[in-house]
Amino acid sequence: MLFDLLLVAAGLVLLVFAGDALVRGAVNLSIRLGIPALVVGLTVVAFGTSAPELLVSVKAVLSDAPGIALGNVVGSNTANILLVLGVPALFATITTRGTDTRRSYVMMIGASLLFIGLSWAGPIRTPHALVLLAALAFMLFDAYRGARASAPGSDPLDELEGVEMGMRWRRILLYLAAGLVGLPLGADLLVRGSVSIARDLGISETIIGLTLVAVGTSLPELATTVAAALRREADVALGNVIGSNMFNLLAIIGIAGLVGPLPVDPSFLTLDLWIMLGASLLLAPFVFRGWPINRAWGAGLTALYVGYLALLLI
C-alpha cells in the first residue's frame, strides 16, 4: 500500500510540473509562429492546463479502468466547486460581482445536462463522444466570438499564462519535451497506483477516481485559487472553475470516449452525477446575483464536500 501511495504521489507531482512545462512550451511556440493570443488562450492554454486530467482519463481507458476516467471528471467537477471555491473563501472573500460569467455558466449547466443524458444512454462510445466534441467546438467558437466582440482589435499577450516574450527555441523545445514525456509517465504512475490501491482496499476503481484521483488532479487549481484569495485577486476564480468544468465534461470525456468505451457505473446514475449537478446549481446566486463567497459560504461548501467524501467511503 505504501508503495502504491508513493506511485500516486510521484504521478501527481509529475503531472503538475509536466503540465506546466507543456503549457509554457506550447504557448511560446504558438506566439513564435504568429498565432493570435486570443486563439492561443482559447485552445492551447485550455487544452494544456487540462492535459493532466486528459492523460489520466485516456490512460485509465487504455488500462481497462474506465471507472477512474469517469470518476476523475465527475469528481473533479464537484471538487472544483465545493473544494476549490470553498477552501479559499475560508481565507478571503471571493468577489463575484465584477465577473460576467452568466453565459458561460448557462453553457456549463447545459454541458452537465448533456453529459448526464449521454451517461443514461451509456456506455459512452464514439457517437456519444462525437456529440460532446461537437458541443466543445460550439463552446470554443462562442467564446472566441464573444472575446472578439468585447475587445475588438486587442491581442493581450500579457494576459496569457506562461508567456515569456523572446523565449529561445532551445527552452521552448525543452519545455515541450518535458511535458510530452512527463505527462504520460505521470498518468501511468497515477493510474497504476490508484488501481492497485482500489484492489488492496476492496473498493471500486470508480470510488478511487471520484476521491483520490479527482482531488489529486484538482490540487493545482486549489493551490492557485488559495494564493489568489490571499492576494485579494480571487475575483476570476469563478470563471476559471466554470471553464474548467465545461472542458472536463466535453473535451476529456469526448476524447477518452474515442479511445475506448466508458461504461457508466450505476452509482453515477443514482448519486454522483446529481451531486455534481447540484453543486453546479449552487453557483447560481453567485453568478446571477453577484453574491460574494464569504467565509460562511466557504465553510458550507467545504463541509458539503467532506460530507460527500464520507458518503462515498463509509
Image (tube, rainbow, N blue to C red):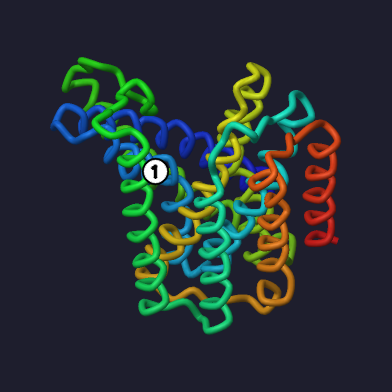
The percent position of residue 31, horizontal first and vertical second, equals 21, 29
* Residue drawn at x 64%, y 56% as measured from the top left: 75
* Front-most of residues 11 and 145: 145
* Front-most of residues 81 and 23: 81
Characterize the local packing of mark 1: few (<14), some (14-19) or many (20 or more) Cα atoms within 10 angstroms: some
- Residue 224 found in image quarter: top right
* Front-most of residues 200 and 235: 235
The percent position of residue 231, horizontal first and vertical second, equals 63, 16
Q: Is residue 282 in view? A: yes
Q: Please give left or right for residue 300 compared with residue 54 in the image.
A: right
Total label count? 1
Q: Is residue 181 in view? A: no
* Residue drawn at x 70%, y 66% as measured from the top left: 272
The percent position of residue 105, horizontal first and vertical second, equals 56, 52
* Front-most of residues 199 and 82: 82
Image: 116 above or below 50:
below
